[in-house]
Image (tube, rainbow, N blue to C red):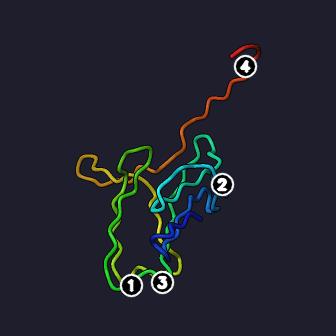
Amino acid sequence: MAVIDEVPGLEVGIVVNKQRLQEHQDRDADISPKTAERYIEAQSGAEYEIYYSFKDPFPGDRTVSMIVTVDGKDMDEPIIRPFELFDVKGHASQGHVSRQGRQWVVQKYSFSQIDIRECHGNL
């Protein structure tokens, strides 16, 4: 589960079919200390959720507002009030919320189709 040292108590992971995906870390990546970067195995076309939870020592006396960004696009802006922060089940962003006509709908996150081709010869 991705953890940012600068924000102790916040944990984030990707869930597919109620199973958290295994994360891999690139130890040679040149990233900011305020950033956590992990890789997962994408399952072509699979729907996923972004799961996050708050635990001690995360401060529980304030509302948390965050922006979920996928592929450089802001997709969700959850707000978690202090009494909700430490919910033992955690929290999930299930997809992009948009308005279609008079209704609000959630367009679930899903991995793009992966096109794998075998190549023979020179690249």
Specify the amino acid type for callout 4: Cys
| Disc 4 packing (10 Å; few <14; some 14–19; many ≥20) | few
Residue wearing tag 1: 60
Q: Residue furthest left?
A: 102
**How much space separates mark 1 and mark 2, taking CA atoms?**
30 Å
Q: Nearer the viewer, mark 2 or mark 4?
A: 2
Q: Secondary structure at mark 1?
A: loop
Q: Residue furthest top?
A: 121
Tally of numbered tags: 4
| Disc 2 packing (10 Å; few <14; some 14–19; many ≥20) | few
Residue wearing tag 3: 57
Q: Secondary structure at mark 3?
A: loop
**How much space separates mark 4 and mark 1, taking CA atoms?**
53 Å
Quarter of the image holding residue 80? bottom left
Residue wearing tag 4: 119
Identity of the residue drawn at 62% across and 45% down? 42
Q: Is residue 59 left or right of residue 117?
A: left
Q: Secondary structure at mark 2?
A: loop
Q: Nearer the viewer, mark 3 or mark 4?
A: 3
**How much space separates mark 3 and mark 2, taking CA atoms?**
25 Å
Upstream in the sequence, badge 3 or badge 2?
2
**How much space separates mark 3 and mark 1, taking CA atoms?**
9 Å
Upstream in the sequence, badge 2 or badge 4?
2
Q: Nearer the viewer, residue 18 or 103?
A: 18
**Whether label 3 touches label 4, CB < 8 Å:** no
Specify the amino acid type for callout 2: His
Residue wearing tag 2: 24
Specify the amino acid type for callout 1: Gly
Q: Is residue 41 above or below residue 112?
A: below
Q: Is residue 8 left or right of residue 72?
A: right
Upstream in the sequence, badge 1 or badge 2?
2
